[in-house]
């Protein structure tokens, strides 16, 4: 990698960490103008930036407002780079349906997970928040999504997830369901029949990054083989 | 001398000596058992003063839970300011109402949104007022009548986009602070309306401001000043009060204590023993039982140990850390009251 490429990837990373949208936009435009690989820029610039943000959140250096601003900076870069990601970024394709279940209007955690799916190049069908249970089931059937992600911040709404999971699995046993949100625990995920869970935005971010890193590794190994 | 629940609760909030810790709450505590007894649907009770009062009375009648609290949702003040609520009347399972239309869309309005002159008749404020009066008439000599509203920041997230609130809390702190100051003024007026209706105590629920969301620095700079203003006003009015915050609060407990409330309430995520180390034994701390798992999922036998544990940590009243989830098992709520009666003197650090 050239010094210039390194410099720009570093700027993307630091821009995300400092929630410096303008800095990220400038670096992303330079990547495009100078013909540098956009996929590399995302995975060696923006993603490591978010990864560091996740660490700062865990160390209680950053809190939710900071996380949201970093996400804005990341999206600002992604929007510029995405049209130039000519190859399937990770060599995987996937369709995801996601949303916050009815009765809950808190979508911060869901949006952070969505961001990582966007980065990975998945086709994301975001149903938004306060989504009636049957809409998840219908949307899964309509899109034939491999993965459905359900989010709830309140215990009161978490209870509704159980029915959604059951209905989705009945209609399409191959679909995988991930659940997340403050009240969700591994125990509850098991009881509800979910395939995976993340308990809060920080864990969701970490899990999503782990997922991306693993996919990237598989892709890199396949490329070099 | 035997205390009535009202004497026990109010004397404690006034700093007087009582016989044992009370078992009550400043937040929602109605159960499905109460709804079924009355033949009500949860979605129907939020706009009807008679139903609201009848339902609020059930937890004392069924379990001896030492209070009656109205309302049951988090939309009353937001509606009074022009938000539109969704009560989920057509959904089969029980849901808490949410805001479906925000009162403030335009950032320009954050520090100058309109406030109704006649707050006492805005939205469902008159419904809550009427419910308080009915409860007062029914057993106001015996049971303390509680009410609550959201703190300014949490209310801000109801009347305006929460995502933007959180970002502006950082980027445009002065603007958000001006908004919170305006909301604090509204809440002080609402408190006076509830006090005049006969409410015995008020809980200020600044739920969405714990350190799961905001940094302690931001809490101190942005949240605290407006709570100080509110509790100064409540003190001047002479209405007993509580400051409640959900989630993680150990990092801000000192600042919470400096807000000047008569008492504080915290949830399970607060290590109360650690809080006592930080702020000493004088402040009243209520809490910190699990409002969902302990009362809905766990067997009733688990409740006594949890009560003892909370008392050992140093709480002054047995409060669930949030609204009791209505599907709480009646035997668990009964066990909560009974364990408090049994251990509320012997295991209370002030009596030991």
Image (cartoon, rainbow, N blue to C red):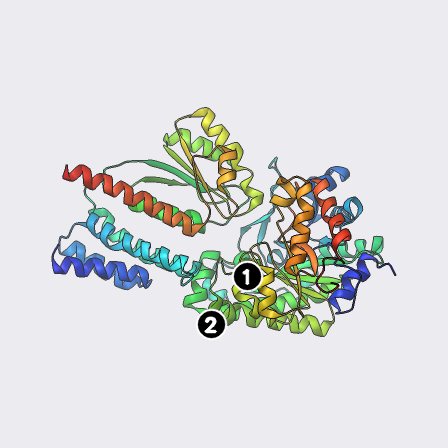
Depth check, front residue: A91 or B22: B22
| Quarter of the image where one finds residue B92 | top right
* Left or right: where A139 falls relative to B224: left
Quick check: can you spot residue A206? yes
- From this view, report whether residue A138 is shown above or below residue A213: above
**Label 1 chain ID:** B
Helix, strand or loop at label 1? It is loop
Residue on which disc 1 sits: B249
- Quadrant, the N terminus of chain A: bottom left
Residue on which disc 2 sits: B174
Depth-wise, is mark 1 or mark 2 nearer the camera? 1
Task: Measure the alpha-carbon separation of dots 1 and 2.
Answer: 24 Å
Q: Residue at x 41, y 52 (%)?
A: A202
| Residue farthest left in this picture | A2
Q: Are there few (<14), some (14-19), or many (20+) residues within 10 Å of tag 1? A: many
Helix, strand or loop at label 2? It is helix
Label located before the other in sequence (1 or 2): 2
Place of residue B46 in the rendered image (x, y in percent of width and height, measured from the top left): 68, 48
| Quarter of the image where one finds residue B272 | bottom right
Depth check, front residue: B301 or A202: B301
- From this view, report whether residue B63 is shown above or below residue A145: below
Place of residue A105 in the rendered image (x, y in percent of width and height, measured from the top left): 51, 48
The total number of labels drawn is 2
Q: Residue at x 25, y 43 (%)?
A: A216
């Amino acid at each position: 990698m050239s010094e210039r490429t390194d410099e720009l990837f570093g700027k993307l990373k630091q821009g995300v960490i400092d929630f410096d949208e303008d800095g990220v936009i400038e670096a992303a435009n330079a990547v495009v103008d100078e013909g540098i690989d956009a996929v590399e820029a995302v995975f060696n610039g923006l993603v490591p930036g978010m990864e560091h943000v996740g660490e700062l959140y865990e160390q209680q250096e950053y809190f939710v407002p900071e996380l949201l601003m970093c996400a804005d900076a990341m999206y600002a870069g992604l929007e510029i780079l995405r049209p130039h990601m000519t190859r399937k970024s990770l060599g995987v394709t996937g369709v995801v349906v996601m949303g916050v279940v009815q009765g809950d209007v808190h979508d911060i955690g869901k949006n952070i997970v969505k961001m990582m799916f966007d980065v990975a190049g998945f086709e994301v069908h975001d149903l938004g928040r306060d989504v009636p249970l049957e809409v998840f089931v219908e949307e899964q059937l309509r899109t034939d999504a491999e993965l459905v992600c359900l989010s709830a911040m309140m215990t009161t709404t978490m209870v509704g997830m159980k029915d959604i999971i059951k209905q989705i699995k009945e209609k399409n046993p191959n679909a995988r369901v991930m659940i997340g949100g403050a009240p969700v625990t591994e125990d509850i995920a098991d009881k509800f029949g979910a395939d995976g869970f993340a308990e809060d935005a920080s864990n969701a971010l970490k899990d999503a990054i782990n997922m991306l890193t693993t996919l990237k590794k598989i892709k890199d190994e396949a490329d070099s083989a | 001398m035997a205390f009535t629940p009202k004497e026990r609760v109010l004397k404690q909030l006034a700093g007087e000596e009582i016989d044992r810790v009370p078992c009550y709450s400043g937040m929602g505590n109605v159960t499905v058992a109460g709804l079924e007894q009355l033949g009500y649907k949860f979605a129907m009770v939020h706009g009807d003063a008679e139903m609201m009062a009848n339902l609020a009375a059930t937890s004392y009648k069924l379990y001896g839970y030492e209070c009656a609290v109205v309302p049951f949702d988090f939309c009353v003040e937001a509606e009074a300011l022009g938000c539109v609520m969704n009560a989920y009347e057509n959904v089969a399972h029980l849901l808490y109402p949410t805001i479906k239309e925000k009162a403030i869309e335009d950032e320009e309005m954050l520090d100058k949104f309109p406030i109704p002159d006649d707050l006492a008749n805005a939205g469902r404020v008159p419904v809550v007022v009427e419910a308080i009066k009915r409860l007062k008439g029914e057993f106001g000599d015996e049971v303390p009548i509680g009410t609550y509203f959201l703190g300014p920041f949490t209310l801000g997230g109801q009347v305006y986009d929460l995502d933007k609130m959180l970002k502006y809390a950082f980027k445009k702190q002065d603007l958000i602070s001006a908004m919170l100051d305006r909301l604090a003024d509204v809440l002080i007026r609402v408190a006076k309306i509830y006090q005049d209706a006969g409410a015995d105590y008020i809980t200020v629920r600044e739920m969405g401001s714990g350190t799961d969301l905001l940094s302690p620095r931001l809490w101190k700079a942005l949240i605290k000043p407006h709570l100080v203003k509110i509790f100064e006003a409540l003190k001047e009015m002479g209405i007993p009060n509580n400051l409640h915050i959900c989630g993680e609060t150990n990092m801000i407990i000192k600042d919470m204590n400096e807000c000047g409330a008569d008492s504080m309430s915290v949830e399970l995520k607060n290590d109360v023993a650690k809080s006592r180390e930080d702020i000493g034994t004088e402040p009243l701390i209520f809490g910190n039982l699990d409002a969902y798992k302990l009362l809905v999922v766990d067997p009733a036998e688990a409740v006594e140990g949890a009560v003892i544990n909370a008392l050992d940590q140093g709480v002054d009243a047995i409060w669930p850390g949030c609204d009791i989830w209505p599907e709480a098992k009646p035997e668990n709520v009964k066990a909560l009251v009974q364990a408090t009666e049994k251990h509320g003197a012997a295991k209370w650090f002030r009596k030991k």
